[in-house]
Image (cartoon, coloured by chain):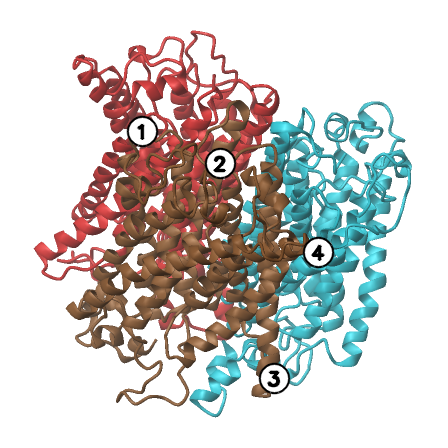
Chain colours: A cyan, B red, C brown
Amino acid sequence: SINTVPAGALNFSRSVLLVVSAALVFFMQAGFAMVCAGAVRKKNVQNTMLKNLLDACGAVIAYFVVGFAFSFGGMDPESTRTDFIGKENFFLMGVEDYAFWLFQYAFSAASATIVAGALAERCQMAAYLCYSLMLTGWVYPIIVHAIWNANGFLSAMHMEPLFGVGMIDFAGSGVVHVTGGLTALFATAILGPRRGRFHDDSGRKLDTPKPIQGSSVALQMLGTFILWFGWYGFNCGSALLIVNEYTGSTVALAAVNTTMSAGVAGITALFVNLWYLERTTGEPFFDLTYAMNGALSGLVAVTAGCGVIEPWAAVLTGIVAGLIYMVGSRGLIMVRLDDAVDAIPVHLMNGVWGCIAVGLWASPTRISRFFGRAPHPGWFYAIRDGNPGDMRLLGAQLVGLLFIIGWVMSIMVPFFIWLDWKGWFRSDPLEEIVGLDTSYHGGLALLNSHQDSVQPEYITA
Amino acid sequence: SINTVPAGALNFSRSVLLVVSAALVFFMQAGFAMVCAGAVRKKNVQNTMLKNLLDACGAVIAYFVVGFAFSFGGMDPESTRTDFIGKENFFLMGVEDYAFWLFQYAFSAASATIVAGALAERCQMAAYLCYSLMLTGWVYPIIVHAIWNANGFLSAMHMEPLFGVGMIDFAGSGVVHVTGGLTALFATAILGPRRGRFHDDSGRKLDTPKPIQGSSVALQMLGTFILWFGWYGFNCGSALLIVNEYTGSTVALAAVNTTMSAGVAGITALFVNLWYLERTTGEPFFDLTYAMNGALSGLVAVTAGCGVIEPWAAVLTGIVAGLIYMVGSRGLIMVRLDDAVDAIPVHLMNGVWGCIAVGLWASPTRISRFFGRAPHPGWFYAIRDGNPGDMRLLGAQLVGLLFIIGWVMSIMVPFFIWLDWKGWFRSDPLEEIVGLDTSYHGGLALLNSHQDSVQPEYITA
Amino acid sequence: SINTVPAGALNFSRSVLLVVSAALVFFMQAGFAMVCAGAVRKKNVQNTMLKNLLDACGAVIAYFVVGFAFSFGGMDPESTRTDFIGKENFFLMGVEDYAFWLFQYAFSAASATIVAGALAERCQMAAYLCYSLMLTGWVYPIIVHAIWNANGFLSAMHMEPLFGVGMIDFAGSGVVHVTGGLTALFATAILGPRRGRFHDDSGRKLDTPKPIQGSSVALQMLGTFILWFGWYGFNCGSALLIVNEYTGSTVALAAVNTTMSAGVAGITALFVNLWYLERTTGEPFFDLTYAMNGALSGLVAVTAGCGVIEPWAAVLTGIVAGLIYMVGSRGLIMVRLDDAVDAIPVHLMNGVWGCIAVGLWASPTRISRFFGRAPHPGWFYAIRDGNPGDMRLLGAQLVGLLFIIGWVMSIMVPFFIWLDWKGWFRSDPLEEIVGLDTSYHGGLALLNSHQDSVQPEYITA
């Protein structure tokens, strides 16, 4: 089971390799920071990056104090008990498997930092801090408990799992990315768009939304590569959580599927967008954003299934992920939602898609290699085996998604509305115009030391 | 043999560590991207980086569909059979060792992306895409088959190897770097130099070639460090391909040699250049490019021998590598070949040198620890053992190099000439002046939204 | 003992994982380079980064030739012998455990490069090179010998250790960070502050020191994340040096403690500074530098104890580290010491604190799991066990610190004074004004090619 520590050399290797994986997942914070730094305007770079760093630091405290306890405290894989929340292992007390703790911490930090980019350039610091602690300490752990704790009601490792199979979310398309992406969606909707994105200075709706140029495509590309690199820790590390004779091959399968989906999704998004531009504007061009976010979309989508689907299914997952990104990114603009780094199509929409894809293509062989049993496969295999009515896994995936959506919504929407009502959520217009770096991070002091007024060229940069 | 999977804990560790190595090799794409982004002008940064990302994505598809099959399909290490190309394992079908597949994929992507920098700032996108797929799907796999497949005619693992010994290219100075570097050479020669590099605006040859300042030395330095870091995966991961009682020490040997050669070559190139400038111009300075590309040259050169030479030989390899870079970089300018990132002296010239160095210094002890036999050592050891006529290994290395050169030339030269003749290779002069980011990546649309003409200061940046 | 190589699968894993750790430690060079590049002005970016690369390259040579031999040459863990310096294993001769060599090399390079940032923007190249070789080849190895070599007089692995317990510096808060940080302190004191930092152009002392804005916060943040990431190799790799049944859990403990201290210290420094600004100036702001350097301070401080303290002690270590950074950074300015990257409060002060923290909180269980014996625990445990007089470990830690301070001072202070007296240490005022990139790295040639005078806007950048 997920928390059992095997003996001897295997134990040694598994523990160390899990730490290596956790380090890679931690390094994804640098990837998020670079993606965000590249995608926002120069005047907000510091603010956005600080949020990434604070997610990493704050999650340490939140996960140490309550997060891990709520998620995995007192888990008993051999009991048929189902509970909502863990009640032991606060402050790491009684925890034996520290490598597991670290790996889970890194995941919780990733979940929080997904939101940073979407809110960029217009969110108050205090609001961000509150939200970040609440996500890593409360909202996210409950979801982890339901899906990854053997006593969670959705867990595929439960002795008596939902629909006889439980939800399979191998490395967290749902647990991590839908949770983060959904929070980003709610926050963005309530926060409203950045000034000038959809309206002119006098508040009139623009016919064409104004694209906001980021500060550095080079940093965004670097961030994309770092994220892809770190994803090998994210997905393959999850395969280390159950050690048996197949673990080596499950790790390799997860890595291959991760690569497949990312590569295919990047190519799909780039070229379908090229074709679409050609058809609609007659001026096709290679849009880097589509290649970068397409690849990230493929990574998100394959996360749920990387250890239980075959590579051909990873290719299909990637193709659909690239298309979802393309449609989703344009759709957001149509509904006038402003997402500075496209976190919503990348993490939310493709997180949802990833969970569904498992319901379609999870291979019975791969499932049983990891979980030790495979009561119900993906729908494709059920049909192949003459069992087209066996949609139990797909059903469990959908129930799981509904649970995540319902839970996040029930906590986060009231919270953000309350923040907004108190005036603690959105920055003042002047702060936003001048830039959050100047407003919150001492730029004003710096400017003051040289002259009395803010330089106009600084503001527009 | 290279493809045999050992059992139990060792299998687990080997599989996972190979995935870790593959992830490091993949991360080298970020290194190449940063080196390129730093070395080109601001107006071409996006274009160059997109090529790096597309190499990583495109190689997924090419290697999945045909690349791996051509390289390793149906390999039988216990047969004396020799063939030219693999005919099985398309679409990963029948492949058991997924970790091995992933590692080889990452190598093929590296091979392709070596070229990106050399062609920077003047190559059409479509031409680059065609070339990249052809390299990873056809040209490179055939070379891998000949040298790394136990049924390849040059393979040191062949039951009846060439000259009784076969070519030893431990991690690919020849297979990866000569292949990529040679392609860069042919492409650069046919594409011609960037505007203004060797000629003035009216086409008159300049007395002194005009240096073209890159956009950011910081990114170039970052890229250099990322490449060096990733190289530990590249070279040490190759030591994991044959698992026996010495694997742990071969991995460590490869790591130490990699470090030695890189450090020594960086120092050599920096200081010899300093001394040379002092002698010729009287104005010596520490040229960062020499330190960075010197270190990379040392890495390339030691790649062929890292697991089979002693550290003292790695030091010698590095010294020569630093000198080769220095002479090669100046030589390129003398023959008026324009290589924006010096990929040709780094990867081609030092790739060739690395293969020759193995013929000189491969240690019989180290060879037999890895391959399980050492019929003929490097020439130095043959001489030491009173056998100065035994130049069989050196001979095999030279034949291997000739094969690589002949094969790449026979495919790539006609291909590039055809592309050029069709007008699909080189960007229009105006596209080049304005910058490829504006020409191919939507910059024009962006400029249009603000004013009707391209800003002059943007063009010169 | 530290140098004994275990057999079979464990040996394989341990060797490869040590190489992985060494690669991570090596990658910290990129982190230092980015932190420095971000913290200095644009006109000195190249100069600072070259020093980081040269530390990595130069340490190869210094450690290959003499460094390792002085540190570990001829170590015999089963002898009661104590010596000052190793006299074997020059040029890697007779060394069997190459992975251990590589890991130690990476540490020596880290030790040297800590200094680069503190001296930035005003130190001559030649002086830096001399100092770097002397540190990695002579000063640092002697300290390693005393503390980490089983025959060193401070070693906890000595058969008859100091005070019956020896100094415990698990991964080098003292050995690496105090050594580097102290050198930075002496160098900074003798070199003097950058022009304009504490005095105006006519040399009059400024009432308020003038902050010098770095070139890029994004690069500094990237560097911080890379350092944190690499620190998992630094601290966890050290746990691999003694392989026994607990190694897996010691690695995980080290990783968890590392994370704890970093996160808590970053939060502490950021928010206490916020609170302090609010109290003193009434204009509180979130200062990124405090979050970044706070986290690094936590990493430095936990390095000595990461494998022998419990997570709650790591939290306390981190809180104090954050406070020390805050006070130390302000203190430096009060005494008019100019440290461009705050290396002194981060590495020196928190290195000292880390060694003391071990004396307070080292757990007897954890010590005996790593060292196989735990004659005297941290003072907290001694008190708990009714033994408040047992301050032997704390005493050994203090003696160790005094040794490091005395040794570094006795070599480095005369050396820097001599360099300064010869006029080889500090750059000419004009070189400093124009920027070291132009002065030492060919910028002048570049400028000359365009115009006859240095552009004023370049100088102020």
Kindly report which numbered mark, 1 or 3, lies closer to the viewer in this rendering: 1
Kindly report which numbered mark, 1 or 2, lies closer to the viewer in this rendering: 1
Residue located at (28% from left, 14% from top): B376
Q: Which mark is residue B196?
A: none
Q: Pointer 3 and pointer 2: residues touching (CB < 8 Å)? A: no
Q: Is residue B204 above or below residue C333?
A: above
Residue tagged 3: C278
Q: Is residue A160 left or right of residue B154?
A: right
| C-alpha gap between disc 1 and disc 4 | 46 Å
SS for callout 3: helix
Tell me the subunit letter for badge 4: A
Q: Give the residue type at disc 4.
A: Phe
Task: Name the one closer to the observer, A54 or A275.
Answer: A54
| C-alpha gap between disc 3 and disc 2 | 52 Å
Residue tagged 2: B106
SS for callout 1: loop
Categorize mark 2 by other alpha carbons within 10 Å: few (<14), some (14-19), many (20+).
many
Q: Does residue B429 appear in this view?
A: no
Q: Which mark is residue A64?
A: 4
Q: Give the residue type at disc 1.
A: Gly
Q: Quadrant of the C terminus of chain B?
A: bottom left
Categorize mark 4 by other alpha carbons within 10 Å: few (<14), some (14-19), many (20+).
many
Tell me the subunit letter for badge 2: B
